[in-house]
Amino acid sequence: MPYVDRQNRICGFLDVEEDENSGRFLRRYFILDTQQGCLLWYTDNPQNLPAGAEKMGSLKLTYISKVSDATKLRPKAEFCFVINVGMRKFYLQANDQQDLVEWINVLNKATKITVPKPGEGHISHVENPQEVPGAIKQVSYKTEIIGGVPIITATQEQGENGSDQGKRAPNQLPFFLSRTVQDRAFIKAGYCVKQGAVMKNWKRRYFILDEKAVKYFKSDLDREALRVIPLKEIHKIQECKHSELMMRDNLFELVTSSRTFYIQADSPEEMHSWIKAISGAIVAQRGLGRSTNTRFRSDTLPPLK
């Protein structure tokens, strides 16, 4: 059952589906921190974890549009409820029916936006302090509809001498998942060197292959991909036949209708591993199933539907 800790936060254990649509629920310790405006979860109560232990995930309360019972949506998941955050749905399992009802109530209460009625607001007179150049003068809020969900973001203005008047504050992601959580959903991940599309220069990038796409990032610390290449758009994946002309070893090519990506692995083994992994993911996505005994080639890939 959820309880209130010494810091006046609502806490308790729940099972959460961290990998979207995986059907796999993991036991996590949740903390609803209304002061910080977020719902956090850890592998255990932070008091039982080493100092500075990383949280497994968090949701920003201002981005939560609805929390509701999901037992009909997920009949196999007992006492299940869903949190809608932008375009993502997080499914959680409570311990029993009472636990389910209480968590839904406290989360909906924490995310409810209330507007004071006329005459209820209390206004006190405060002398205007001398304006400091560059200091934040006013914070207003802007509502946008993203994926059918109203998103409220802060817009900050600065003093007369400030340079950011009317400038919108940087966007923040509606939720966070630790790299540990994200890596579980990957088929393969690692650094490779990729040729640029315009300047044709070579840069080291962090590649991730999952069940839907090949993505590459500036580094393994970044969370926004520089580019996402859907598997359904890949026509060929093979060792590059022009590697000698390009003066690059361990080079393979990933061919789409709009572009050919030239990627260099760190070793011949890594190159073949990437080719096999990507080919296998494409075959699996197109419904032919994986085969560990088949050596995938570009001409064995099934046609796009």
Image: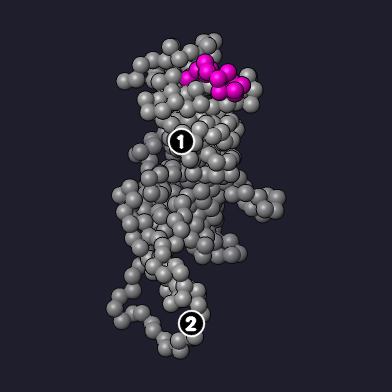
**Image quadrant for the C terminus?**
top left
Q: Is residue 72 left or right of residue 193?
A: left
Residue 102 seen from this side: no
Q: Which residue corresponds to the image point at 67% horizontal and 53% vertical from the top-left?
A: 52
Residue 198 numbered tag: 1
| Label 1 secondary element | loop
| Residue holding disc 2 | 131
Is residue 121 covered in magenta? no
Label whose residue precedes the other's in the sequence (2 or 1)? 2
Q: Position of residue 250 (x, y in %)?
A: 60, 21
Helix, strand or loop for disc 2 = loop
Side of 245 relative to 260 (left or right)? right
Left or right of 228 in this view: 239: right
Q: Residue at x 49, y 86 (%)?
A: 129
In the image, the segment drawn in magenta is 237-251
Report if residue 46 is visible in the image. yes
Left/right placement of residue 119 relative to residue 131 reads: left
CA separation in Å, label 2 and label 1: 48 Å
